[in-house]
Image (cartoon, coloured by chain):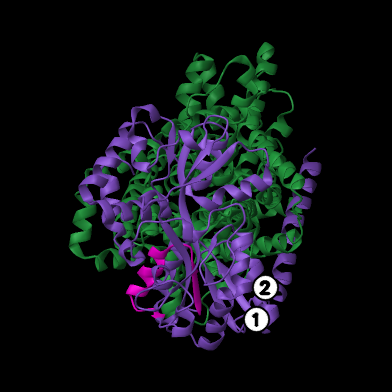
Amino acid sequence: MRARGATRRTAITGLTMRGLVGTLVLLPAVTACGSDDADLTVYSGRGESLVGPIIEQFEEESGLSVDVRYGNTAEMAAQILDEGSNTPADVFLAQDAGALGEVSSTGAFAPLPADLLDQVDPAYRSADGDWVGLSGRSRVVVYNTDRLTEDELPETVAEFTDPGWEGRIGWAPSNASFQAFVTAMRVLEGEDATRAWLEAMRDNGTQVYENNIAIVDAVANGEVDAGLVNHYYLYPKLEEQPDLPAANKFYGGGDVGALVNVAGAGILAESDATDAATRFVEFLLSDTGQTYFATETSEFPLADGVAQPEGMPELASLTPPSIDLAQLEDLSGTLDLLQETGVL
Amino acid sequence: MYAPRRQSTRQTTRQTTRRLSRPLSRWPGRAPARGLLTAAAVAVAALAVLPAVYLVIRAAEGGQATAWDVLGHARTYEVLLNTAGLTAAVTVGAIAVGAPLAWLTVRTDVPARGLLTVLLALPLALPSYVAAYAYVSLLGPRGLVQGWLEPLGVDRLPSIYGFWGAWAVLTVISYPYVFLTVRAALRRMDPSAEEASRTLGQSAAGTFRRVLVPALRPALAAGGLLVALYTLSDFGAVSMLRFDAFTRVIYVRYGLIDRSAAAVLALLLVVLAVAVLIAEMRTRRAAAAHTHAGARYVRTVPLGRWRWPACAGAVAVFVLGAVLPVAVMVLWLVRGIRAGYAFGGLGELVLNSMQAAGWGTAVAVVAAWPVAILTARHTTALTRVLEPATWIGYALPGVVVALGLVSFGARHAPALYQTMATLVVAYVVMFLPLAVGPIATSVRQVNPAWEHASRTLGHGPRETFRRVVLPLSRPGVTTAAALVFLTVMKELPATLMLAPTGFSTLATQVWSATTDNFYGRAAAPALTLVLLASLPAAALALRDEIRPGRSGTAAGDRATGLRRSVRGTR
């Protein structure tokens, strides 16, 4: 009995040790694959499934090799700031104008060539000329088509404070796009009006979600009837489950609910591959790049003369509120307001 | 292997003990050896406090205004209470679930004991973000379960969001920390105290309360500590279940790139963690006198007609902690396959995950040794500071540790930045305590007299370590390696920020697919991750099961028997 137990133990331990030793011997061989020798290093605050294919296409067409690091936009902006002058990044792709503005404000971006900037409406690029929008993302209301028709939704998001909507709406106060929307409301309608709206929404039992995806899920399964989200979250869901009872309502008439934010790019001032970086941003603004965003990520192309995505309104027809995206920088003011009203 | 040598060594030890006229020093190394050890331990601890240093720098950058702004906000204290409450509740919950299950699988005749032991360890393999997402899609107000109940007229389940949802999910995935530590303690325990208690007329309940529970206190405290700090640093579950704990609020601040305010909040989290650590150390010290280690096997408690109900209860815990979340992932997988996703590239992800976890584990285990030996053998003012220092990285949310190392790495070690080396350092900083704990426990069980014997017989300190301490501590090393390995596999924020650019692991792939909204694509890497992480989890349970309680050949048993005899001669 004793001997058997001991043998089994020794066998197991031996196996573990052999496994460990095996791993250790194997490792250095594999480690060699991490490389600094790519022509371009991109920090992408947008996911691999969203931008990976277009980056591969750039590699094929340009003959340049690209290393991509994926992460969350805000965390990556913090990472770039923490890396300071030693940042390995040549290009920062972000999905929020606020994060681009934050990096820009520390002077970490280099100015972009004028011919590149000029392809995009001034509303969707940096006034300082150091970052440029690549694709547009509109705020919308996603609603459950079993419960509602588009006509039953109010004409402005301000009216969701009506008692008739009590407990039926979802929002995501910790989400960067939602916060940009609240910042826009503060800029357009003032601090007091925004505070009053937030409090009324809160008191009307608006349901809090972690992010836009969770809201779309909640709307689709009827947990809430409608939610405040960005427009493109719905389409991949519909691709996974075509019979999902959910649709987007685009707002207009300058309503803050129609705010169009951008995903964009900036080139790091410390980059030693500025030429390759510039070619990369040019490629993303070319017909190929813009058509990719329109068809594959369901976003609005921003460069002049590129076709709009199918099944969605024209960006030009949207009449979003007229606001300088640089004005959306004051996120900490928004955070304070969200905390004071107990929304966040 | 050891058997033939045992008798002679024991005799030698006795002779040695008699020969030594001065009191036994607890570590037989000479001053230089100990100095080297101390230096190594201090170096490891210094690495471990780097993230905290970073936080102080960032917080100072914001100036006093930011600090007072954060500290003066009533909401900060609300979040502090939230976090403390959740931590306490999850710890109590995990002990309430884990400890009885440990007793059930060690001391009773519950059916399928061995199998249950392995199954009950498996929830360790689930990342909290996966478990929480699975529960939300299952039990959300309009989740899958509600769909099944719809025909019965249930059109909305009570909300699982908030405190109780976060509590339940964290409890069912973290109880194995208590389960495994208490099991190990029960198997080491000397039954004679319990038998004496019964002989002296105590009832079974009285014996349980007066003998068993006090003797298990160190194990309960150690398991509870792991659970408490896991809860403090968890982001996945509290964010999915919408509970405002510190990690979620810190994350929101980083979302606004308000790094100074985030740093102040994170420092408050450090204070909370230190409070938990002090409480645990107190418990351990108070209970030190109660620890026993037995050489004999304990009579199995017959459960009678409760055998099957008890087994069913244990299975229910396993179902909640592992089966349900995995079932939801399988559902995503089916959806993904229907949507026609390809599942290529898994092989490379597996290799990368194994590589990162393998390196992290190897280095963490080596780095843990000096700290483990010092804390096990020398309780000095220095070790009282060293031990909690090594815990700080474990208690902080991953994104905070990662940003700290980004800052130091990019500025002071640019050549190593974003290589496997920085990533491994991050893993060591975050998970060092998972390695120190089991190794220190094993070292405590090695009788110093054996080392004295080795020294007397002419071996140097290094040789003694290699031939006596290391082999006898092997169970601790195996436990440490398994725990670190499975935890590194699940790690996300540091891997995203510090891995070599372009290096994807299973965890980053799951994250990537879910942030982009493709849950169907997340399923395959998520299931693979859980499967791979469940191997070390099962090994933890199995190793414990195989170590014979009856035979007395286990290292701990031999060493303890010897220690008692040595004490007797003093």
Q: Residue at x 73, y 71 (%)?
A: A25
Can you tell which quarter of the image residue B80 is in? top left
B331 vs B317, nearest the viewer? B331
Q: Which residues are magenta?
A: A90-109
Disc sitting over residue A65 in the figure: 1
Q: Residue at x 55, y 59 (%)?
A: A299
Q: Earlier in the sequence, mark 2 or mark 1?
A: 2
Q: Amino acid at mark 2?
A: Glu
Residue A21 appears at what percent x and percent y? 72, 66
Residue at mark 2: chain: A
Circles 2 and 1 on the same subunit? yes
Residue B148 appears at what percent x and percent y? 65, 23
Query: Closer to the camera: disc 2 or disc 1?
Result: 2
B145 above or below A11? above
Q: Residue at x 36, y 50 (%)?
A: A255
Quadrant occupied by the N terminus of chain B:
bottom right
**Position of residue B464 in the picture relative to residue B242 (left or right):** right
Residue identified by numbered label 2: A56
A108 above or below A50? below
> Is disc 2 placed on a helix, strand or loop?
helix
Q: CA distance from mark 2 to mark 1?
A: 9 Å
